[in-house]
Image: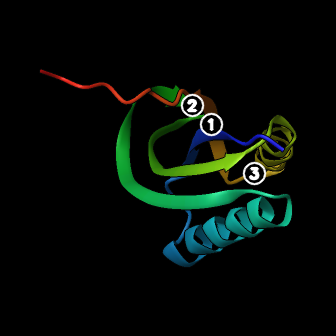
Amino acid sequence: MFLNSYETIYIVKPDVTDDMNLSLVNDYKALLMQNGGTNIFVQHRGRRHLSYNITHYYDGIYVQMNYRGNGILVNILEKSMSLNENIIRYLTVKQDILPNVTIY
């Protein structure tokens, strides 16, 4: 089975505690692993001001996840995020693998 590289960034409500945020990260990592995700790398991007308010929030906690998987895995992950009331926005993009380029 061929696995693509994906990057998912989601924004958590600013009133979520650090423990709850860590719990969300661990839940999504477990969800990815259970459904065949590999090379999972999570980065906490921290609290940032939003360009415009989203559901009356002006700040949000950004979390970035990079992983390898298939399209079904992305659908499962995004479905779970859409049902979570602590996540106000999410976006998944497929990353292209760049060929090795030699610079002279």
Residue at point 38%, 53% (across, down):
45
Quarter of the picture containing the C terminus is top left
User: In the depicted view, which residue is nearer to us: 10 or 16?
Assistant: 10
Q: Is residue 12 left or right of residue 84?
A: left
Q: Which residue is mark 3?
A: 85
* Of pointers 1 and 2, the one earlier in the residue sequence: 2
How far apart marks 1 and 2 lie (CA) works out to 8 Å
* CB under 8 Å between discs 1 and 2: yes
- Residue reaching furthest left? 104
User: In the depicted view, which residue is nearer to us: 90 or 65?
Assistant: 65
User: In the depicted view, which residue is nearer to us: 15 or 93?
Assistant: 93
Residue at point 81%, 58% (across, down):
36
* Of pointers 2 and 3, the one earlier in the residue sequence: 2
Q: Nearer the viewer, mark 3 or mark 1?
A: 1
Which quadrant holds residue 16?
bottom right
Q: Residues within 10 Å of mark 1 (few under 14, many from 20)?
A: some
Quarter of the picture containing the N terminus is top right
Question: Which type of secondary structure does the marked residue at label 1 adopt?
Answer: strand
Q: Is residue 83 left or right of residue 8?
A: right
Q: Nearer the viewer, mark 1 or mark 2?
A: 1
User: In the depicted view, which residue is nearer to us: 39 or 31?
Assistant: 39
Residue 84: x and y in percent read 78, 52
* CB under 8 Å between discs 3 and 1: no
Q: Which mark is residue 54?
A: 2
Identity of the amino acid at label 2?
Answer: Ile
How far apart marks 3 and 1 lie (CA) works out to 10 Å
Identity of the amino acid at label 3?
Answer: Glu
